[in-house]
């Protein structure tokens, strides 16, 4: 019974990682994935590398907080 529960739990987690799951998460990504001179922000979406890497594991409230901060961020797009 223990191994069955393990596989059932694993299958439920895999189900969460389907395309439909990710499609329902709003992202500010505009497919211009380069960092500014400082390496602090992506010049496309203005997120930090850490925010980008954790985006799909954050809660909705964490993502909403970041989305509200993005317009205030200054990104140097000159190279």
Image (cartoon, rainbow, N blue to C red):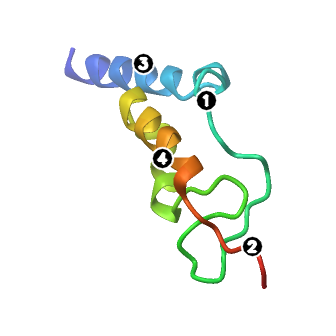
Q: Which mark is residue 77?
A: 2
- The residue at the point 78 percent across, 80 percent down is 78
Task: Kindly indicate the quadrant of the structure image that contains residue 28.
Answer: top right
Q: Secondary structure at mark 3?
A: helix
The residue tagged 4 is 69
Please, what secondary structure does the residue beneath circle 2 have? Answer: loop
Comes first in the chain, label 3 or label 2: 3
The image quadrant where one finds the N terminus is top left
Q: Which residue is mark 1?
A: 26
Going from N to C along the chain, the mark reached first, 4 or 1, is: 1
Measured as percent of width and height from the top left, residue 24 is found at: 61, 21
The residue located at (58%, 66%) in the rendering is: 41
Foreground: disc 1 or disc 3: 1
Which secondary structure, mark 1? loop
Going from N to C along the chain, the mark reached first, 2 or 4, is 4
Question: Which of label 3 and label 2 is nearer to you?
Answer: 2
Q: CA distance from mark 2 to mark 4?
A: 18 Å
**CA distance for labels 3 and 2:** 42 Å
Image-based side of 19 in relation to 16, left or right: right
Rendering coords of residue 58 (x, y %): 40, 38
Of residue 69 and residue 25, the one placed in the foreground of this image is 69
Q: Quadrant of residue 42?
A: bottom right
Quadrant housing the C terminus = bottom right
Residue 56 position (above or below residue 37): above
Between circles 4 and 3, the one closer to the viewer is: 4
Nearer to me, 8 or 40: 40
Q: Residue at x 66, y 24 (%)?
A: 23
Kindly identify which numbered label has been placed on residue 2.
Answer: none
The CA span between labels 2 and 1 is: 24 Å
Q: Residues within 10 Å of mark 4 (few under 14, many from 20)?
A: few
Q: Give the residue at mark 3.
A: 12
């Amino acid at each position: 019974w223990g191994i069955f529960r393990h596989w059932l739990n694993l299958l439920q987690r895999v189900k969460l990682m389907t395309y439909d799951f990710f499609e329902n998460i709003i992202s500010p990504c505009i497919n211009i994935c380069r960092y500014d001179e400082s390496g602090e922000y992506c010049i496309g979406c203005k997120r930090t590398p850490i925010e980008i890497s954790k985006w799909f594991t954050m809660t909705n409230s964490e993502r909403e907080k970041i989305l509200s901060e993005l317009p205030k961020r200054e990104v140097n797009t000159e190279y």
